[in-house]
Amino acid sequence: MNIEVETQFGFVAILDVLGARGYNVDHAKEFILNRDAMLDKLKEKPILDAIDESLPMPYIATFGDTVIFTWNVGQDRVMKTLPSVASWLSALLNLGIANKMLLRGALSVGEFISRESTVLGPAVSDAASWYEEADWVGVVLTTKCKLSLISLLENAKHNQRLKKIDFNKWFVEYDVLCHSGKKRMWVVSWPYNAWAVSDDEMTAIEMLSVALSDFSIPKGTEMKYENTLQFFR
């Protein structure tokens, strides 16, 4: 039986949850409940109102402690929707904190295919090669995605509509501490959006500190948390 699988073009984000691989069965059950609650929260209207309505909800696939998000936006809409994807990922990272999950990953752009729980393609491979590289909580842009952002920033100099978008709200160039040393990379500026998904008046750094205080931090893993706090400052 021949089944046609459509080639899609858009964004792929792969994120994993720090510390989840050492969970026992009880912690794994709690993790699944918190993960599902976080993903359900992302569908609520107040959060969606802050995101460009032209951005479709992502296709979501999960495996273990890893979540894959894909947005099939088409090659001609990559530039238009990139800020909205950053907005969505910012909400995701902050909701992760609220649900006691610390997420880190990478965002790529390009071709991919998806069918049921399977997602494959160049954009998936690109994101997969970077999502565990950074030693912190956050999302880095792969080199290919960075080039899309640079093109967008250049276009913004001459495009009146793009000039109105505050790209510094969603992206920042930062010295990310990776496993192979520091790398100057473009990253999602998710602390900027830290109050958008909070149900109380805690500041971003307070939310993060409270979340970190609930985690055991074995010797040798502390830099992940220090690097994240430094990014907030």
Image (cartoon, grey):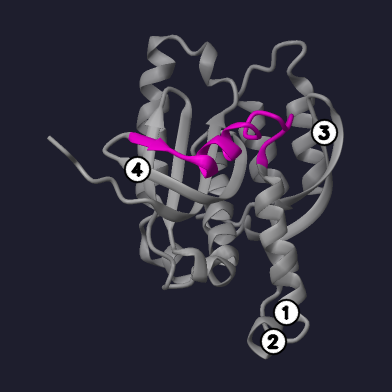
Question: Residue at the left extreme?
Answer: 1
Disc 2 packing (10 Å; few <14; some 14–19; many ≥20): few
Give the structural element (helix, strand or loop) at label 1: helix
**Residue 48 belongs to the span the image colors magenta:** no
Residues at discs 4 and 3 in contact (Cβ within 8 Å) = no
- Tag on residue 177? 3
Distance between the Cα atoms at labels 2 and 3?
A: 34 Å
| Residue depicted at 74% across the width and 28% down the height | 224
Q: Nearer the viewer, residue 115 or 135?
A: 115
Distance between the Cα atoms at labels 3 and 1?
A: 29 Å
176 sits to left or right of 93 = right
33 sits to left or right of 110 = left
Residues at discs 1 and 2 in contact (Cβ within 8 Å) = yes
Q: Earlier in the sequence, mark 4 or mark 1?
A: 4
Residue type for callout 4: Ser
The residue that mark 1 highlights is 156
Distance between the Cα atoms at labels 4 and 1?
A: 32 Å
Q: Which residues are magenta?
A: 118-138
Q: Quadrant of residue 181?
A: top right
Say if residue 190 shows up in the picture. Answer: no
| Residue depicted at 75% across the width and 86% down the height | 158
Camera-near label (4 vs 1) is: 4
- Tag on residue 159? 2
Q: Position of residue 98 (x, y in %)?
A: 53, 42
